[in-house]
């Protein structure tokens, strides 16, 4: 990736996007050093214009941005950074620097759901069904995936579309919980499917 930094400031704007939900989280600026540090550390790093120094996002708050990938735009003078946020991104405590994003719709909501499952994994076991399932390790959600898979097939063969969507929703939810119980996410599945597609 070749980035064309501004000849006067040595900076390029960096747009940060949540890799799971697609939400635009913030805008920062990088110089060559910040870009190199982002690549080598895996933590998104900027050049702070107000402090006139390198700044790792989350260095004081702990709300780091974990690099997934980066790309330069068609002119090479702006950077798109896809990252996994650890906590809210904005210094105000909001999820993004533009406030709270609207919930994603359709398949895009799966990214939001993954984040919700991760939050509930840290909550007390008594606080939610998700937390109770995760407390059982892979066996709990694994059993539910088996049950829901059978119910989804039955619905596909003998029920209307609405019932099939309900059963498929149960199956996908429990699959996401099962993946979380093993420290995995839908991103891991998507990446494997992408790799297979590129080999085919």
Image (cartoon, helix red, strand yellow):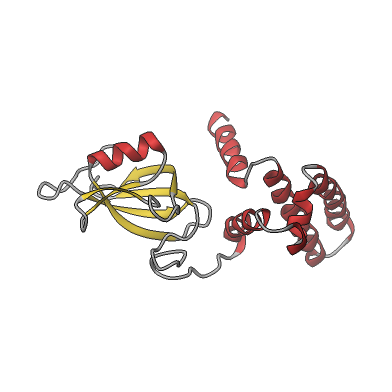
Quarter of the figure that contains the C terminus: top right
Rendered residue at 38%/53% (across/down) = 60
Rendered residue at 44%/50% (across/down) = 64
In the image, is 144 to the left or to the right of 86? right
Q: Position of residue 44 (x, y in %)?
A: 37, 46
Q: Position of residue 20 (x, y in %)?
A: 53, 52
Quarter of the figure that contains the N terminus: top left
Q: Position of residue 35 (x, y in %)?
A: 29, 41
Q: Residue furthest front?
A: 60
Rendered residue at 55%/68% (across/down) = 103
Q: Nearer the viewer, residue 35 or 59?
A: 59
Q: Nearer the viewer, residue 73 or 44?
A: 44
Q: Quadrant of residue 170?
A: bottom right
Residue 105, above or below 77: below
Is there any visible trace of residue 168 in the rendered image? no
Total count of labels: 0
Is there any visible trace of residue 78 in the rendered image? yes
Q: Nearer the viewer, residue 186 or 86?
A: 86
Q: Residue furthest top?
A: 199
Q: Residue furthest left?
A: 8
Residue 101, above or below 58: below
Q: Quadrant of residue 154?
A: bottom right
Q: Position of residue 162 (x, y in %)?
A: 78, 67
Rendered residue at 67%/53% (across/down) = 121
């Amino acid at each position: 990736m070749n980035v064309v930094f501004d000849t006067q400031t040595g900076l390029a704007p960096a747009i940060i996007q949540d890799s799971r939900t697609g939400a635009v989280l913030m805008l920062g600026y990088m110089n060559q050093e910040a870009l190199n540090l982002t690549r080598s550390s895996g933590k998104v790093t900027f050049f702070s214009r107000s402090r006139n120094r390198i700044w790792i996002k989350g260095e004081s708050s702990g709300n780091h941005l974990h690099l997934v990938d980066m790309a330069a735009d068609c002119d090479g003078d702006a950077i798109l950074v896809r990252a996994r946020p650890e906590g809210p991104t904005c210094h105000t405590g909001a999820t993004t620097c533009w406030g709270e994003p609207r919930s994603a719709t359709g398949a895009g909501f799966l990214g939001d759901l993954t984040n919700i499952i991760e939050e509930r994994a840290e909550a007390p076991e008594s606080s939610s069904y998700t937390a109770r399932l995760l407390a059982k390790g892979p066996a709990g959600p694994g059993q539910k995936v088996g049950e829901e898979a059978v119910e989804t097939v039955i619905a596909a063969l003998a029920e209307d579309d609405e019932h099939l969507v309900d059963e498929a929703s149960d199956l996908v939810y429990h699959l996401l919980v099962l993946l979380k119980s093993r420290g995995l996410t839908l991103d891991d599945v998507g990446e494997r499917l992408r790799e297979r597609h590129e080999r085919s």
